Image: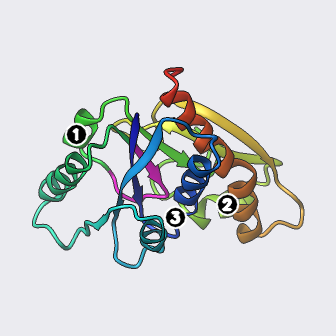
Amino acid sequence: MLRIAALVSGGGTNLQAIIDAIADGRLKNTEITAVVASNHRAYALERAKANNIPAAVFTKKGFVTVEAREDAMLRFLATHNVNFVVLCGSLMVLGKKFLTTYVNRIINIHPALLPNFGGKGFYGLAVHEAVLAAGVGITGATVHFVDGGIDTGEIILQKEVVVLPTDTPETLQRRVMTEAEWRILPQAIAMFAEGRL
């Protein structure tokens, strides 16, 4: 059984995509056993509550050091028997201890076709603003393993989305979510659960 912790920072739409994929049978032998948020305002916490998923908030200000925060997070995940971690729009940068504890068992969803439009500062609407400013005709989403860098881990799946001449950062963000992110994230989790990664 794959027991997932979802790390979140915002609305939790990718968390909802996983919840839905489990509910409709696309994800088998998988359950979300914990949600970890980086702030108290993350709407993803409401999604966790609505689905009876244990959740906790670990803010930067709540701990003296980054290591103390990470230790507390790891204890919470251990309590809920987590064996796989999914970054669902999480802005947390994970340290060495976390990466070592869950080596090759952490994945992230990124709203662009990596290695393009990835790295420091490329998150949320900033990604889609950069795509539009570059004038490219194709964007998309990437699921990748998490390593010590930002958006640098081995790519698992990618899905392309056409950039329309009428797109704004907001309309492009929405289409990348609905046409790519919400599809390939559950697919990548299923691949791991079935031993295909």
Q: Quadrant of residue 191?
A: top right
Q: Residue 174's x, y, as percent? A: 72, 64
Q: Mark 1 points at which residue?
A: 96
Give whichever of discs 2 and 1 has the lower sequence position. Answer: 1
Q: Distance between the residues labelled 2 and 1?
A: 30 Å
Left or right: where 132 falls relative to 118: right
Magenta-highlighted residues: 85-93
Q: Quadrant of residue 20?
A: bottom right
Q: Which residue is drawn at 49% across and 21% down?
A: 195
Q: In which quarter of the image is residue 42?
A: bottom left
Left or right: where 16 falls relative to 83: right
User: SS at mark 1?
Assistant: helix
Q: What residue type is labelled 3?
A: Gly
Give whichever of discs 1 and 3 has the lower sequence position. Answer: 3
Q: Residue at x 56, y 34 (%)?
A: 190
Question: Can residue 92 be found in the magenta stretch?
Answer: yes
Q: Which residue is drawn at 29% across and 68% down?
A: 57
Q: Residue 185's x, y, as percent? A: 59, 44
Q: How far apart are marks 1 and 3 (CA)?
A: 25 Å
Q: What residue type is labelled 1?
A: Lys
Q: Dot 1, crowdedness within 10 Å: few (<14), some or many (≥20)?
A: few
Q: Residue 166's x, y, as percent? A: 88, 67
Q: Name the residue under label 3.
A: 12
